[in-house]
Structures are given as C-alpha cells and as structure tokens.
Image (tube, rainbow, N blue to C red):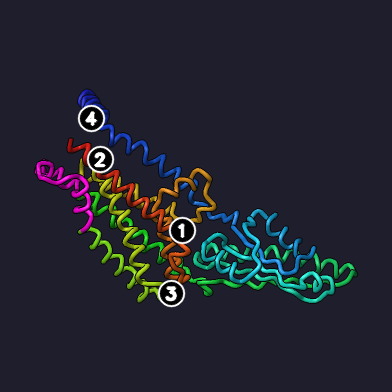
Amino acid sequence: MNVHKILAVMRKEMRQIRRDRRTLLILLFVPAFFLLIYGYALNFDIRHVAIGVEDQDHSSASREVISAFTNSGYFDLVAAVTSDREIDDLLDRNDARAVLVIPSKFGADAAGGRPTAVQVIVNGDNANTATTVVGYALGIITTISSRYEMQARLGSTAGPILALEPRVWYNPELRSTFFLVPGLIAYIAMLTGVVSTSLSVVREKELGTMEQVRMAPIGPPEYVIGKTIPYFFISLAAATLIVLAAMALFELPMRGSWVMLLASTSLFLIAALGLGLLVSTVADSQQVAFQIALLTSYLPTLMLSGFIFPISTMPAFLQAVTYAVPARYFLVILRGIVLKGIGPAIFWPQLAALGTFAVVILALASMRLRRQWM
C-alpha cells in the first residue's frame, strides 16, 4: 500500500470538496439541523395546556379548584366562559384544549358533605394530548379530594369526595387513527407536491432544454404557472384518493363540507408545489433537488406542524419557525372539517395564511427564474 498515492487522492478529494461548497454545507448543516429539530421538537411532556373555565358557582371552593389547575404547571388559563356556545367556539377555534366546568352549588355541596363533581370537556382531535389532559385533571381532582377525605378521618365535618367527569368531544373513543390519519394526509400531500415539482425545472437543466425555454416567447410567471398546473391536478387526485382510502380503511369521518375540503386541499397543494418549484430553481441537479425537497417538506411537516408533537410544548424560537410551515395551517383546517364539521368562519385565519404562503412562494420562484434567465 503506497502512502503517497493515498495522500494524493486525499488532497484531490479535499480540493473537490472545497469547490463543491453546496454539498459541504449540506454535510455540515444537516446533522446540526437534525439535532436542533429532534432535540427540541421531540418532547413527550405536555405542559402549558390552554384551558378555559366555566365557573357556575363563584365560591371559595370553586376558586380552589381553578387555582389547583393553574398552579399545577400543566394548565394555562386562557378564557372564562359563561355559556355552552362560548365553549363550542373556544374548542372549535383551538383557543383551548379543554374547558373546566364547575357546577352551581359546588361550594354548598362541598360544605354540606354531599358528593359533587366537576366536568372537563376535552378537544379530542389530538387523541394523545386529550388522554394526557384527562390524566392531569384526574390527578389534580384526586389530590383535592384526598384533603376532604383527610378532614373526614380527623373527625371534622365530612366533605365530599370530588369526582371528575371527563367529556371528549369530536373523538369520544380517543381513537388514535382520527388523530394520525389527517396528519398522514397532509404529510403525504406535502411530500408528493414538493418532490414532484422540485425535479421538473432541474430535469430541464440536466437535459439541456432550459436554453430553448429561455429563447421561447414566455416569461417566468407563465412558465411557473404552466409547470404547476399539471402537477396540481395529479397531486389533487392523489390527495382525494388518500382521503377516500382513509375513510374506507380507517373509518375516518366526514362531518364537514366536501367543497371546503377540496378547496383548502387545493390551496395547500399550490403552496407545496410552489415550494418545490423554488427548490428546483436553487438546485443544479435532481439529486440535490431531491435532498433539499426532503429537508424542506419531510422534516418540517413531520416535526413542526403539530402532526405528532404539540406546538405549545416547543421552545418559543421553534414555535416561531412553525409559522413558516404550511402543514401547520392545513392540519387545523383538515381536522376542523373532517372531525368537527366547522366551516371557513372558524378557520379563515389558516386559509389566509395558506394563501399568503402560496402567493409569496410562487412569487419567489418566479423571481429566481427571472434572475437566472437574464
């Protein structure tokens, strides 16, 4: 074995790596990026759960229960409601994950030693979070109840043993498929849309037909739109088949409007296809385009969209990053239509965010192409 030959090959490879700075950047950036995403987003501890309260009693005993929830570190009080309609609106808009309902005469029953109960209404569109919230609430109520039991054993007036009555909306059986399948639909649609268009422009670069396109009487906006439309219909057909298969195989309900589902899915796909076109204007080969497409679609959709891990448990800086992930908005819309049966009057902010993302990303792709053609 010749050491000089090995060193010669090594020097040649080092020069090649220095010339290919894009690959070097990917090799150095990807491990740190993975550590950042997985280290902060993989968090199974659910804290700071947004909770609303309907206190129908307004007694010292009811305030004690509310304080126990808010001081536990698991719940953050976000609203006080006074009617069932406000509870519906709070859960439909995802402003709260649960609502604590304390009945009237709660304090009087407690003082008189009569059994009483509090109710926790939980948003069940995320089965894992809902199960955890019910467990937290049960632990808090059990702790308060034990104090009443201790007073009874000490010979004082026997107080009630508090009970918890959990009610899970939208997914009473807490089936994990109702939580996972909508996320899989968004994940598959995003990945398909970004990868399909990310390879389209790069393919023309590799085949040498891009120069012919530049000489043709067509501008970047027309080229981008023309590239997007075929993949849009293919991706929409694939997404529709995924939804139908999920309903047939996993009993996914459809409680909302099919028209709104198709419209919102179309908007999401336009955003995904636009992101793929932007990637294709940056990459010089299909291999690099595929890698960038996976980094910009696979990981953010899986980790930062609320698909698996609640966004509220992530650090503040990572929560800010999630606003640039289109699947974050589409998941709220999709679960709202399919599981809750709500309409655009509730999720219009998510629709507006998706529309803004789609317009901005298509404009950036057109600007990149215009700069390359000049």
The residue lying at 10 percent from left, 45 percent from top is: 216
Based on the displayed image, in which of its 4 quarters is residue 243 positioned? Answer: bottom left
* Residue 226: in magenta span: yes
Amino acid type at image mark 1: Ile
Amino acid type at image mark 2: Arg
Q: CA distance from mark 4 to mark 1?
A: 40 Å
Above-or-below relation of 37 to 23: below
**Residue 21: image location, x then y, percent:** 28, 32
Q: Residue furthest right?
A: 155
**Residue 59: image location, x then y, percent:** 78, 65
Q: CA distance from mark 1 to mark 3?
A: 22 Å
* Nearest to viewer (mark 4 / mark 3): 3
User: Along the horizontal axis of the image, is 164 left or right of 301?
Assistant: right
User: Along the horizontal axis of the image, is 4 left or right of 40?
Assistant: left
Residue contact between numbered discs 4 and 3, judged by CB atoms under 8 Å: no
Q: Quadrant of the C terminus?
A: top left
Which of 239 and 229 lies nearest the eye of the viewer? 229
Residue contact between numbered discs 1 and 2, judged by CB atoms under 8 Å: no
Secondary structure type for disc 4: helix
Amino acid type at image mark 3: Arg
Q: Which residue is mark 3?
A: 255
Amino acid type at image mark 4: Gln
Secondary structure type for disc 2: helix
**Residue 369: image location, x then y, percent:** 22, 41
Q: Which residue is mark 2?
A: 368
The mark that comes first in sequence, 4 or 2, is 4
Q: Which residue is mark 4?
A: 16
Residue span colored magenta: 201-229
Q: Which residue is mark 1?
A: 308
